[in-house]
Every structure is written in C-alpha cells, then in structure tokens.
Image (spheres, rainbow, N blue to C red):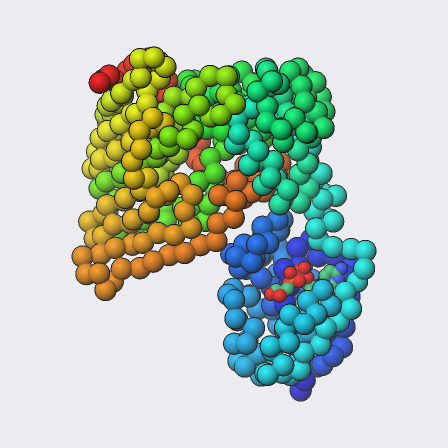
Amino acid sequence: MKKVITYGTYDLLHYGHIRLLERAKNLGDYLIVGVTADDFDKSRGKINVRQSLMERVEAVKATGLADEIIIEEYEGQKIDDIKRFEIDIFTIGSDWKGKFDYLKEYCEVIYLDRTEGISSSELRKKKSGLMLGLVGEALFLDKFIKESCYVNGVTVKGIYTPSVDLLSNQQRNLFIVTEDYDYLLKNVDAVFIYAHPKLRERQVRYALERGKHVLCESPVALNENKCRELFELAEAKGCILMEAMKTAYSTAFSRLILLAHGGKIGKIVSVDATCTSLRDMYEEGEAEIWNSLNKWGPTACLPIFQLLGTNYCEKKIISHFNENRKIDVFSKIDFLFREAVATVKVGIGVKSEGELIISGTQGYIYVPAPWWKTDYFEIRYENPAENKRYFYQLDGEGIRYEIVAFMRAIEKGKADFYIDKNVTYAIAKLMEDFENRKDFVQI
Ligand code: C2G
C-alpha cells in the first residue's frame, strides 16, 4: 500500500485546497492530511487564520478525501510523521517548491501545481474588508498602523484628532485626516481609540451611538459606572466594544496566567508588577501629558486582577506628584486580598526594573523586563534543578494579535474574553478612585 502525506492550514477551505487533496489522494492508496495547530501557525508567523483547528479539521474531513487526519504541532514533526507512518510520498503545493527537499532523505517528495487565482488570504480579505479609523495622535498609533498591515482584511482609512497639527507624518499620510469626528465615523466600520484617557469615554460613546465597533485602549473610561454604561450601549447597538491592552493578547502572558491558575506554583500569595517609562512622559505629539496611573495602571493591574480576582478588601494608592506638571510621576498601589497581597508600581518620570513576580506556596513565576511585552518567563522552585523556562512567539508586541482578535469578534458578533469584563470595570474603578483621591496618599 502506497502511503501519501500532505500538510496545510486549510483555513476557509476552498477549491485550491480540494484540488490539491484530490491529486494527493491519487498519488497513492492511503492519504494522511496534517492540519496545523493554532500555536504552530502562530509560531510560523501565520496569525490571520480565521477558523479554529476543529473547524478546519471538520472541513478537511468533509471532503471525504483524507483516510486519516493528524495535527501538526511542531517544527520538525514532518520527519517524525514520515518515519512513524511509514510514508512513501510527501506532497505539497508548488508554492513550497524546494522548501521540503530535505525530506527526500526519508521518502519521495512531490510538488503539485498550486491552483491559481484562489487563496485563503484573498477569501479572508473579502470576508472582512474592515475599514478602520484611528482616534488620537500619540506616536503609538504609528506602530498600530504598521501592525495593521499584517492583518488580512483591515485597512486603516483615516484618523481623527481635535488638532491635526499634532499628527506624525505617517498619520498625516492616511487617506482621511480630519478634525471632524463625524466625518471619520461616516467613512469607517470601526475605530481604534488611543486618545488622551480623559477623552476616551466620550469618543467611545459617540462611535457606538453611530453603530461603529470600537477597540479602545485601556482605561476605556475613568469611572466605573460610565464604563459599564459603554458596554451596555455596545450590546444594545449590536456593536463590539473591546478593550485594547496588547499584553492581554500575547501568548506568553496568557499562558503564564493559565499555568499560575493551574497550580504550578501552588497557591498564589503575592503578585508584584512594575511598569515604568521615561520616554513616554509626553507621549510625544500629545497635547496633554498622561499621568502614570492612566498610562501604566491598566497593564500593571492586569495580572493582579486576572490571578487574584477583582474583589480586593483594601487598597492604598501612594503617588509622588510633580507639582509643575500636576501629574503623578510615580505611583505605588498596595492591594490587600483575603489571602494574598499585590503591588503595582508605575511611573512615567521614574525608572525601575519592569518585572513581574508571582509568588506561590510552591514556587514563583518570574517574567523579566519588560514583562508587558515578553515572549519568555520562568517558573522557579526552591530546587533550581526543577526550574522551567517557557518561550513563545511574540510578533509586533502583541498589537497584531489584538487587531486579529478585534476582527474575529466583529465577524462572530461577540468578543472573546481576553480581558474579563470584571477586570475592565475594576480598572475603571481604580482610575475613578485615583481621580477622587480615594484610598490615596500623596508624597
Ligand atoms: N494550495 C493550492 N492552491 C491554492 C492554495 C493552496 O494548491 N490556491 C495548497 C498549498 O500549496 C498547500 C495546501 O493547499 O499544499 C494547504 O495550503 P495552506 O492551507 O495555505 O497551508 P500551508 O501554509 O501551505 O501549509 O506545515 C504546513 C505546511 O507546510 C504548509
């Protein structure tokens, strides 16, 4: 019996895939199809895949062409599979010509002509075709524009800011550049808001009222009730409102949260997160300076609220103010939970080691600086021989994953829970307490 194997993502299965599978099947008597796992695709830079692994497997199954379906999970697996399944022929589309010649040592390698004129990327573009507008003028938006180019189907159409003079060159070069928010909203399906934190709540509300989807940098609002109202409004309008915080969408961060929840370090008793930057003090281009807590508070609180919950018993915010600028250049927050403690240290005028440490009864998780854009962390134990290191792919600091998640949420009509609503509300409440100087000490 001649055994044939082929691999692919098979996202939005189309005629090109089916033709390939048919010809692969005809090369032998038994066809094994390897479907790529989501993590494997991510690690090879394929971030736009729209369907889940199970949906893609089901689609391949439905063709009736595969005698067996396996999952491709890691680099180098093809050699393992060929040996294990005693494969005679490895085949793949001609877009890979030459790339798999190294497998000739193990079996015959056949490149089949790729079907012209159809591809998953094109289908994804057609399916979504999302016109996105930007709100704000911070330099971060330049990064966002660059990252959006990696996401199939998203076009950044224009930008609104109350003062176009503040825009960077890249921002000025967008198709629409306007000081009229209505005009931008009329020409887009969705907006990404990265304006001064004080302005966001109004801007989110305005966009939602006009039926536009919103991705808004955290904090979405500086008041808990107003934040809740915005999410209710989004629901009533059938729009997606998603909080943006790139860290929440990075693989290393979400995995470490799962590992910690899964008991890898025993019971969690302390979470300490530090985020500081000197460079961002003026958020270059910004009309008004952001304070430390608005700038870094949401990110620093994310692991704390995700691991310990949002029902803390007490907190104390200690801020060091720069009198000239009327902002906290440094703030420390102490949280007291029923059976754990946490600290946040944030600063835009103070520099410190930006690490994250999660301490447990059996060990601790250490994420080196800058932990909010890490691809790596360690779980450390009393006996160093038991320590474990974890590496994950991180592209574009997580921003492009965030944009992909936003697109998928719009397509599905519901947001995935990267950031729990309770976490969002707890962040807004913290900002509110800071504004009202509640649980607050100034030094
Ligand atoms: N294909 C084709 N014609 C198209 C599109 C795709 O013949 N118009 C073929 C590809 O060459 C590949 C298979 O269909 O053999 C699956 O394509 P993708 O889903 O794009 O998967 P790919 O990224 O090529 O996976 O380990 C994974 C594999 O190395 C490749």
* Along the viewing direction, whichever of 234 and 368 lies nearer the viewer: 368
Q: Please count the marks in the image.
A: 0
> Residue 98 vs residue 216: left or right?
right
> Residue 205 vs residue 380: left or right?
right
* Along the viewing direction, whichever of 213 and 377 lies nearer the viewer: 377
The reply to whether residue 432 is visible in this rendering is yes
Residue 33 in which image quadrant: bottom right
- Residue drawn 42% across and 21% down? 290
- Residue drawn 60% across and 35% down? 145
Measured as percent of width and height from the top left, residue 189 is found at: 68, 29
Classify the position of the C terminus by image quarter.
Answer: top left
Classify the position of the N terminus by image quarter.
Answer: bottom right
Measured as percent of width and height from the top left, residue 17 is found at: 73, 62
Measured as percent of width and height from the top left, residue 102 is found at: 60, 77
Measured as percent of width and height from the top left, residue 371 is found at: 37, 43
The reply to whether residue 235 is visible in this rendering is no
- Residue drawn 19% across and 49% down? 361
Residue 431 in which image quadrant: top left
> Residue 420 vs residue 206: left or right?
left
Query: Which of the four quarters of the rendered structure image does ligand 1 lie in?
Result: bottom right
* Along the viewing direction, whichever of 15 and 146 lies nearer the viewer: 146
29 relative to 420, above or below: below
> Residue 366 vs residue 398: left or right?
left
Residue 381 in which image quadrant: bottom left
* Along the viewing direction, whichever of 368 and 59 lies nearer the viewer: 368
User: Which residue is farthest bottom?
Assistant: 1
- Residue drawn 26% across and 27% down? 332
